[in-house]
Amino acid sequence: MIEKYSSIINLIKLGYSYTEVINYYKELIEKDLIKTDENSYKILTKKGKELLKEYKKENIFPLEKYRIPKIKLDSIYLP
C-alpha cells in the first residue's frame, strides 16, 4: 500500500479499523520502516524496502471474518 501511494481506505475495506491502521503506521515509523516525505506521503525507508522484499513471497489476505464462503455456480446468492 505504501509502496504504491495507495489510500488507507483499502485497508479499511479489508476489515481493519481506522484506529488499527493508524497504530500500524505509528509502529512502522517507530521501527524506521516508513517515513514522511516533503509532500506528506508515507514512503518506505531503505530498511522497509528490504523487509518488503522478504515478505513479498507471502500473500496477505483479508481478515477471516470478512471472507465469503465459495458457492456453486448455479446457487443463488442473496447478500
Image (cartoon, helix red, strand yellow):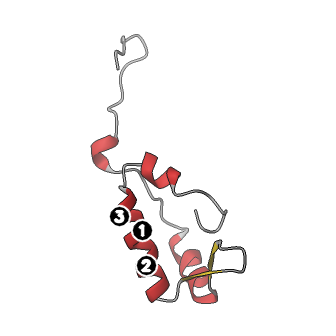
Q: Residues within 10 Å of mark 2 (few under 14, many from 20)?
A: some
Quadrant of image for the C terminus: top left
Q: Secondary structure at mark 3?
A: helix
Residue type at mark 3?
Glu
Direction from residue 23 to residue 50 in the image, left or right: right
Instruction: Identify the residue at horizontal 41%, vertical 80% (top origin).
Output: 27
The disc labelled 2 sits on which kind of residue?
Answer: Lys
**Is mark 2 in CB contact (under 8 Å) with mark 3?**
no
Q: Quadrant of the N terminus?
A: bottom right
**Which residue is located at x 46 percent, y 73 percent?**
25
Q: Position of residue 40 (x, y in %)?
A: 65, 74
Are dots 1 and 2 in contact, CB under 8 Å? yes
Please state which of residues 55 and 47 is positioned toward the viewer in this rendering.
47
Residue at point 34% right, 34% down? 68
Which residue is labeled 2 in the image? 26
Query: Disc 1 marks which residue?
Result: 22
Q: Which mark is residue 20?
A: 3
